């Protein structure tokens, strides 16, 4: 009868357990229900310490059960016969001090025999008269399961009619399943862990919290975080052992995301002393959450955790906490706060992570010189650190006006660039050399960048410009041949230069600018004469226009062009430009803009823009340029002339910062002109940026530019007057 009951219970338990593990139901059951299904009652009376204490090897502490709790002999004689309960396992577990197994065995026997009462002293349970069976129980209690199997097989071989107790077989099966599950977990065979747990639901109880941890980890490692969360939640909802609850949160934090872990923390209890039970690990949890917030797809971390880490960083003074906060703020583009924490970490402990983080914030703050110095010692610590280092060097070399760098710094940047074959920094070396009027050096760097990155169009353009400046016509043609069809500005480089050369010989007016000599008085403004950008050569639009241009006939008298045909008005406009009557020319071009032919409208808009530029009406010139589509070359030409005029006008109106802004915009579309570089130098000087002004004048003076020489002298004189304004 006993064997039948156990067999039926085992079959029902296994079936229900498998179903529960498959759909997550086993983790949604409450504690009592789970216990009833698996044959164990989680609320059984304690017989000694907690399961957790027994598992940790604490000495057994057995609770006496009053003899009055047992049925009296009279009651036994009048009641129905009691089933024989095999209590031998209790004695072995009690003798070994295995309180956890003792508790589990009592729970199991209670579920099988509801009327059974545990003995007051498990050690007093009489030994089994069957010596061989007694030996099997002893081997089982010692965890020697293979020897138990061997002893059973040997006895069955000798005694064919003998059958081992179903209790022993059931407990042996469960113990072996537990051992296989733990071994599979250690070997990272996570699907096997889940399969064993599904087939052995009696392991999924509070008396087997370690097994629940292994199952939860298996779910997490097989990309089923929701199932892992359910396993951890089951422990926190159903189990009361405080150390195991704390360990459950620690283990969950290692595999679950920030958002998922909040579900577990919501089940935190308060100790009898009024302290939250997870308070001892709250600092580590806050660090983990902030660290998770450093990721590219960072979650929104509760500010209370960030504030906790900030307090730790301020009071504990460790570099690691400051680093966590630095990366956290950097990911959120809070560069000021990030720099503060990275700098604190760097000051406490100079490390690769601190140097890289600090360098990134310095680059964002446009302080690449400091960024290069901070990261240089750690440049080879990781690929990311090296990439950040070259970002700093490229930004450093791209500063306009160029920064006068120490020779040692330039040498080490060049060495690292060559070693890493870094094309971006090599290209910036080329532009840096061009800014200092060193075309030969610039050409070498541009060519080097192209060897490392053959499709780098800016480097090819820089190489063409530098060779052109060196009068290396064959070199320019070679670059244009290689980039034919891939870069319009490289292809048109010679055309633009030819046009500028032609118009530079034409007798055009210059802009009126102030010219003063430095005087020994306060805040002297020193300005040199600057020649305005000359208007470009008019387009070749046909024989009629060319004839009018050459002779200037037909436009010496003043007439209203409104009644003229568009083509005639266009010819008159160019004629008036030859006679330096730009406002009348603008009126003629306005009539030509009514032409149906797109090419004629383009020529008219172009001519009107040039006319307004010559008249000093820069804003009107900009409007005229938009009245018709223009070729790329004309667009660049008009933009260059308009920006140059605006820069000169702003300078003459003492709006020096605005003048520098226009010159910066001009530098993005056009090669640097020496007269405008002189203008920039005087703008810096008038803003009391003497170091920047001196660098520009020195570079130009080295080429023999007289205006730059005068500017250099003006800087020296101005600094004698204002020595503290540097």
Image: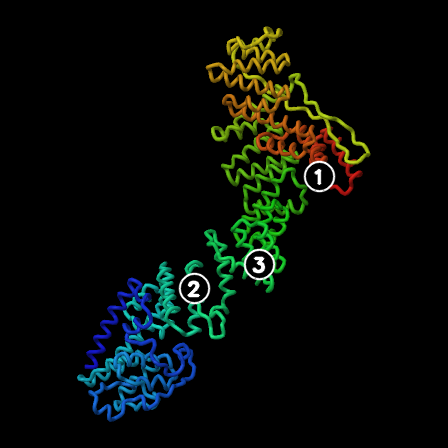
Q: Quadrant of residue 19?
A: bottom left
In the displayed structure, 69 sits above or below 645; it is below
Residue 605, x across and y down, in percent: 53, 19
Marks 3 and 1, how far apart in space? 37 Å
Residue furthest left as drawn = 161
Residue 689: image tag: 1
Q: Quick check: can you spot residue 466?
A: no
Residue toward you, 699 or 280: 280
Residue 266: image tag: 2
Left or right placement of residue 572 versus residue 20 in this view: right
In the displayed structure, 638 sits above or below 263; it is above
Residue at 50% in and 65% down = 282
Q: Quick check: can you spot residue 564?
A: yes
Residue 30, x across and y down, in percent: 33, 69
Helix, strand or loop status at disc 1: loop
Circle nearer the N terminus (2, 3): 2
Marks 1 and 2, how far apart in space? 60 Å
Residue 656, x across and y down, in percent: 68, 33
Q: Quadrant of residue 196?
A: bottom left
């Amino acid at each position: 009868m006993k064997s039948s009951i156990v067999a039926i219970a085992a079959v029902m338990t296994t079936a229900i357990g498998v179903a529960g593990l498959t759909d997550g139901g086993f983790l949604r059951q409450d504690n009592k229900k789970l216990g009833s299904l698996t044959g164990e009652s989680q609320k059984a009376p304690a017989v000694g310490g907690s399961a957790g204490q027994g598992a940790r090897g604490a000495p057994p502490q057995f609770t006496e059960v009053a003899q009055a709790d047992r049925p009296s002999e009279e009651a036994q004689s009048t009641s129905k016969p009691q089933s024989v309960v095999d209590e031998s396992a209790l004695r072995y577990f009690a003798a070994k001090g295995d309180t956890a197994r003792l508790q589990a065995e009592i729970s199991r026997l209670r579920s099988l025999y509801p009327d059974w009462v545990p003995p007051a002293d498990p050690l007093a349970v009489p030994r089994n008269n069957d010596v061989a069976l007694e030996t099997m129980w002893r081997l089982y209690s010692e965890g020697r399961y293979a020897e138990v199997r061997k002893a059973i097989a040997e006895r069955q071989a000798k005694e064919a009619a003998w059958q081992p107790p179903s209790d022993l077989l059931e407990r042996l099966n469960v113990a072996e399943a537990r051992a296989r599950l733990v071994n599979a977990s250690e070997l990272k065979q996570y699907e096997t862990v889940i399969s064993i747990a599904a087939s052995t639901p009696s392991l999924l109880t509070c008396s087997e919290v370690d097994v629940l941890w292994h199952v939860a980890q298996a779910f997490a490692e097989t990309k089923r975080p929701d199932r892992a969360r359910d396993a951890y939640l089951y422990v926190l909802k159903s189990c009361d052992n405080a150390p195991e609850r704390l360990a459950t949160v620690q283990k969950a934090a290692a595999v679950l995301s920030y958002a998922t872990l909040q579900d577990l923390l919501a089940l935190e209890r308060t100790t009898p002393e009024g302290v939250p039970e997870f308070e001892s690990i709250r600092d580590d949890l806050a660090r983990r959450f902030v660290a998770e917030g450093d990721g590219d797809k960072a979650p929104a971390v509760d500010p209370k955790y960030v504030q906790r880490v900030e307090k730790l960083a301020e009071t504990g003074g460790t570099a690691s906490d400051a680093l966590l906060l630095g990366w956290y703020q950097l990911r959120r583009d809070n560069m000021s706060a990030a720099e503060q924490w990275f700098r604190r970490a760097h000051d406490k402990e100079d490390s690769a992570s601190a140097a890289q983080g600090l360098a990134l914030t310095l680059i964002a703050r446009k302080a690449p010189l400091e960024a290069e110095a901070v990261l240089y010692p750690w440049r080879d610590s990781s690929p990311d650190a090296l990439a950040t280092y070259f970002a700093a060097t490229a930004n450093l070399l791209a500063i306009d006006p160029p920064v006068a760098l120490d020779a040692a710094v330039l040498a080490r940047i060049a060495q690292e660039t060559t070693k890493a074959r870094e094309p971006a920094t090599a290209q910036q070396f080329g532009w840096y050399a061009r800014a200092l009027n060193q075309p030969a050096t610039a050409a070498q760097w541009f060519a080097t960048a192209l060897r490392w990155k053959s499709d780098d169009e800016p480097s090819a353009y820089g190489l063409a410009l530098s060779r052109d400046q060196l009068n290396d016509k064959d070199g320019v043609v070679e670059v244009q041949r290689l980039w034919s069809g891939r870069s319009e500005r490289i292809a048109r480089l010679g055309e633009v230069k030819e046009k500028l050369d032609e118009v530079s010989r034409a007798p055009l007016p210059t802009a009126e600018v102030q010219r003063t000599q430095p005087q020994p008085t306060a805040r002297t403004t020193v300005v040199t004469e600057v020649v305005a950008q000359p208007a470009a050569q008019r387009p070749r639009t046909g024989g009629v226009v060319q004839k009018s241009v050459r002779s200037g006939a037909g436009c010496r008298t003043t007439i209203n062009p409104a009644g003229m045909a568009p083509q005639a008005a266009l010819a008159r406009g160019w004629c008036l430009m030859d006679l330096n009557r730009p406002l009348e020319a603008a009126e003629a071009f306005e009539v030509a803009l009514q032409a149906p032919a797109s090419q004629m409208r383009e020529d008219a808009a172009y001519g009107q823009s040039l006319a307004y530029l010559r008249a000093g009406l820069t804003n009107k010139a900009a409007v005229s340029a938009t009245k018709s589509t223009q070729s790329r070359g004309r667009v660049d030409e008009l933009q260059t002339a308009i920006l140059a005029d605006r820069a000169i006008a702003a300078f003459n109106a003492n709006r020096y910062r605005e003048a520098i802004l226009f010159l910066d915009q001009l530098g993005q579309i056009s090669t640097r002109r020496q007269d405008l570089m002189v203008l920039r130098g005087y703008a810096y000087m008038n803003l009391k940026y003497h170091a920047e002004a001196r660098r520009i004048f020195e570079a130009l003076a080295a080429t023999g530019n007289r205006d730059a020489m005068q500017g250099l002298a003006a800087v020296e004189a101005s600094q004698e007057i204002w020595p503290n304004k540097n």
